[in-house]
Image (spheres, rainbow, N blue to C red):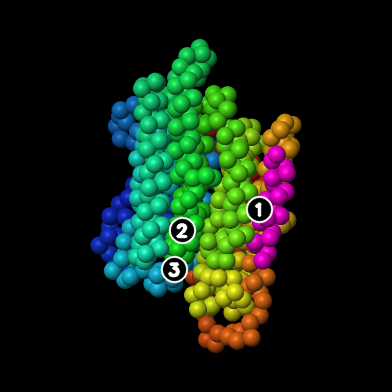
Amino acid sequence: MDFVCNFPFFCIVLCLATGVISSVLKPKVAKAVSVTLVSVCLVCSFCVLFYTIGTGESFTYMMGHFPAPWGNEIRAGVLEGVMASFFCVIMLLSLLGGEKYLKVDIEEPKQNLYFVLINLLLSSLLALVYTNDLFTAYVFVEINTIAAGGLIMIRSNGHCILASMKYMIMSLLGSGLLLIGITLQYDLTGHLLMSNIKESIGALAANGEYTVPLTVIIGLMSVGIAIKSALFPFHAWLSDAYGYSTASSAAILSSLVSKAYIFLLIKIMYRVIGTDVFWDSKITNVFFALGIAGMLFGSFSAIKEHDMRRMIAFSSVAQIGYIYMGLGFGTELGMVAAVFHILSHAATKSMLFVACRGLSEVSGDKKDFSDLKGSGFRNIIAGVAFSVGAFSMVGVPLFAGFISKLYLTSAALEEMSVKMLVAVITLAISTILNALYFIRAVISIYTPRNEHYRIEGFRPGKTFCFGLACFMVINFVLGLASYPIINAIEQGLQMFS
């Protein structure tokens, strides 16, 4: 085994160990350690990605001395490498972009605890990407839930505590349904290793046995993950959780946490149940219907908002609907489009939240559109970044969102059924709605105000500028050089199969 095959395990364990160590460090040291940790995990993830692309094969890593089912396994292929690398990049840039606001939003005694939660969250994200064991995935789902809840409530005001309570109630409901599905699956197959489960379920489906229990298992797992990823109508917690937490927390939660759950669902579809069995269960039709509803409801809710951060949060409901619509097609092209939109949305939404915080900073910490007038002139880098993110969400060519919508439209046209007509019409309506609220926001931040037009001596901060600049570069790369990324996604999904 080549040494690079150890990297996924090293990253997960290193994140867990660093989380423990950060609890006794001073805030500045804890921050430096966490940023270094994310950077190391990013380098390791890139190494795994290039290694699997070079070999053209996935690899498994046995944790400990005992093979499955007594031991545990990690599996890494091209798609895992892409997702792990992307998650590390977004987390690093979110931390750097929102660094200056952590001191303002979080009490000093709790600042090192913030980085404990960041380290635990990163370990759970990487574990969900790499694990080849279904119960281990559930364990890290719970670690992810606890860490995300802590990131929401660490700001210690009434809004954040209430938002965290809503999040925990809904998320634990989803976790419970997922656990029941895993338990029933184990009772049916006797396996927890994903590849072994797929073989057993394939044999049962081929013989026509336990059809109803299999459908129930698929439904429980799917609904559980849908709740945790805030698919409409399970999104009630989302606007408060994203709208009131710190800039870095909102960027990380909106871009990574919900996307990790969706990636776990994709793994279940391909590596646990099998795509043929999953698509035959017709659960994808439910994904499609709820995705379509989410695209419209999220957009209408965003239009009604006057608070810019809550508007961005409701936009996430619509964008998650896009992803589930792609999954709902039940085709390879739909899956590729959904995975690419995960990347596109993660890169764009984190940039929007960080930029919005910068615009709010030069507007008396206000978030209403009327108070943000002229803020694009007062904080130039934040205004430009917000505009780039807005154009991407609308689907303007040259930006990441355009490629997402292009592939989703291609997947819809491939269907040649009722889904095609519904999807194309909804994509068109949703794009118009996206333009209404995002262009309104861009116009607002560039509408001059008579007073306080400029703030003398204001400096946005080096890490803030660096983070937003990198976010914009990623957005343009996804929009202008998407072909290699699409190829990597297609190769990774083939390895899943």
Mark-to-mark CA distance, 2 and 1: 25 Å
Left or right: residue 371 versus residue 109 is right
Image position, residue 68 (x, y; %): 35, 27
Neighbour tally class for label 2: few under 14, some 14-19, many 20 plus, Cα within 10 Å: many
Mark-to-mark CA distance, 3 and 2: 21 Å
Which residue is the site of mark 1? 401
Amino acid at pointer 2: Asp
Left or right: residue 287 versus residue 63 is right
Disc nearer the start of the sequence (1/3): 3
Residue at 46%, 17% in the rendered image: 210
Query: Magenta includes 397?
Result: no
Image position, residue 188 (x, y; %): 39, 20
Amino acid at pointer 1: Gly
| Region of the chain picked out in magenta, as a range | 422-440
SS assignment for the magenta stretch, majority:
helix
Q: Which mark is residue 99?
A: 3
Amino acid at pointer 3: Glu
User: Quick one: quadrant of the C terminus?
Assistant: top right
Residue at 36%, 22% in the rendered image: 187
- Up the image or down, 170 lies above or below 393; here it is above
Which residue is the site of mark 2? 240
